[in-house]
Image (cartoon, grey):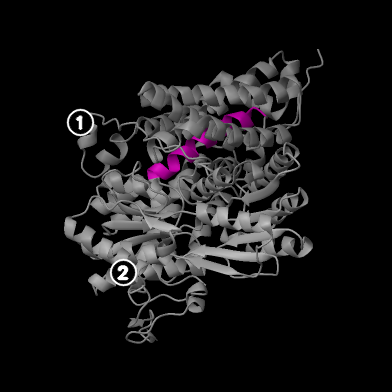
Amino acid sequence: MDIAQNILLTIMTAATPLLIAAIGELVVERSGVLNLGVEGMMVIGAVCGFAATILSGSPWIGMLAAIVAGAVASLLFGVLTLSLAANQVATGLSLTLLGLGLSGMIGESFVGSAGIKLASLDIPVLSDIPLIGRLIFGQDPIFYMSLILTGGVAWFLFRTRAGLTLRAIGDNHASAHALGINVLKIRYLAVMFGGACAGLAGAHLSLVYTPQWVENMTAGRGWIALALVVFASWRPWRVLGGAYLFGAVSIGQLHAQALGIGIPSQFLSALPYVATIVVLVIISRDRRLTLMNTPASLGQAFVPDR
Amino acid sequence: MRKIVFALAATLAVTAVTSALAEDKYKACFIYVGSKTDGGWTQAHEVGREYAQEKLGDKVETVALENVPEGPDAERAIERFARSGCGIIFTTSFGFMDPTLAVAAKFPDVKFEHATGYKTAPNVTTYNSRFYEGRYIIGQIAGKMSKTGVAGYIASFPIPEVVMGINGFLHGARSVNPDFKLKVVWVNSWFDAGKEADAAKALIDQGVDIITQHTDSTGPMQVAEERGIKAFGQAFDQIKAGPTAQLTAIEDTWGPYYEKQIAAAMDGTWKGGQSSWDGLKDGILSMAPYTNMPDDVKAMAEATEAAIIDGSLHPFTGPINKQDGSVWLKEGEVSDDGTLLGMNFYIEGVDDKLPQ
């Protein structure tokens, strides 16, 4: 049992940053904005979270700093693509480049510093439940936040008026504008929410996953989060499923290797990507439903015509 | 997508760096696969570059380009360096081998040094370090320290260098515990702290009580510290990441070699087509302090280190069987360098199938 529990814990740890970053990006894309800078915002979150933790001695302050840093980075993207209507793809890519470079510069003096791990927050009574207690109620705070975020976003998008407005903007910004909705204001808020989530995901990497700072420590996780959003056809619970599936197969293949079963390791390494894409494509095979969920004005700049 | 991003970044960086260079100094250029501050492989090269710069002083301008991905993008980065007036270019990762040779053919007047490869040309010399000597020592320590008799090895890519390290480690462990077993996990990356940490957790969950790695981050060391098991540092002293976990580390010391080769390139005595392969006795690698182990194990490790340095012990001395049980080296037979540099088989006791 201990081994199974350890494996499940490892899977949850591996899935959490992907889930948080993807949920943030999902809201951004639902509002019709494509921000390819997730990787950059995540790595900025990771370094700022780590630096603030070392300077203040408190990983909680570090976590807050990461959220703020991610949101500030996304604001830069927002000004360029929303106010100045720059190309979203190019701006997002530049944000990733900027993030990777800037984080290396900020983090230079923190390389090799001993990190402080964000302690797990055991929920009294519940964490003593046999088998599942420790898994679900004995985790780090960012894990709980990832679940709350997923549920919250699902509720917000599909059960509230504000969520409906956000989706309407993503589907047809011109009509939404004609109805008197402030398109740019809501898109700004969505972009900043996405940035804050990416920053939090970065904080998970540098404060929980491997409490240290090393350059490029996101190692492509931002891109995986972006792909998850698309393959989950912009639905929050599917993003959760996709992130956990990806985590499970990534960890599972490491165990398969350690067991010494004779499958080529190159194939096993590719398996998480292949399996996640295949499964998400299969569950999204209803074309009508997928089209309905795809934000129709995704990636298009909006210039209000008075 | 990432590759494009990196290629753009690399191009920009080279342009910026080269335009800022003074014209009259001799230029020695370095291409790194990772970040200068990775706490492992690349940082060791960076320390070597700084050493050479300090020793050679004002006569030389050294320039480094970090985070260059292996493959076709590397060729562009190396070519930019060659065009920008670099006299000698060090390419410091195995995957830069073919790009280095391709650029070297176009620039016969520029001198190239490729680390850990096996192909040379009239203006390309290779240099390497006998890491397996260090791996043999840490293997022996693992053989003594492990209670379960199983160690975990986090490996990057199935290239001869890595396979040689795995075999060297296991042979060392088996020299003190003939039943020692080794589990290998390939992460197919040189540098991904999270993934390396996941691999370490997977290995520990499956019962190994000592881990070692041939990847570049301190992720595994941190997991070892957290789970209360032992581990070995890679390329750089990682004691800060694992104060109670690190037994020792294999440290790379490239500085004196860089100083020697740059000086030779400047006074015209540099030779192409060479393969330099130095070991513990030359100081190109060294062992970090032996810590967190009983005195008898420490004494054994020190004795082995001394024997390798004075030449009385070659780590790959028979009898050694291949993984399938067939004989590789007979009693007392010593492996030749060619076999080691092209190593594509496991020795007996590896609990893994070598990816081909």
* Amino acid type assigned to the residue bearing label 1 in the image: Val
Residue A51: % across, % down: 45, 27
Tag 2 and tag 1, C-beta contact below 8 Å: no
Which residue range is magenta in the image?
A12-32
From the image, tell me which residue sits under label 1.
A125
Residue A206: % across, % down: 43, 35
Q: Main secondary structure of the magenta part?
A: helix
* Amino acid type assigned to the residue bearing label 2 in the image: Ala
Cα separation, mark 2 vs mark 1, equals: 59 Å
Please, which chain is the residue tagged with disc 2 on? Answer: B
- Which circle marks residue A27 in the picture? none
> In this rendering, is residue A49 above or below B195?
above
- Which circle marks residue B307 in the picture? 2
- Image quadrant assignment for residue B293: bottom left
**Is residue B344 inside the magenta stretch?**
no
- Res B70 seen here: no
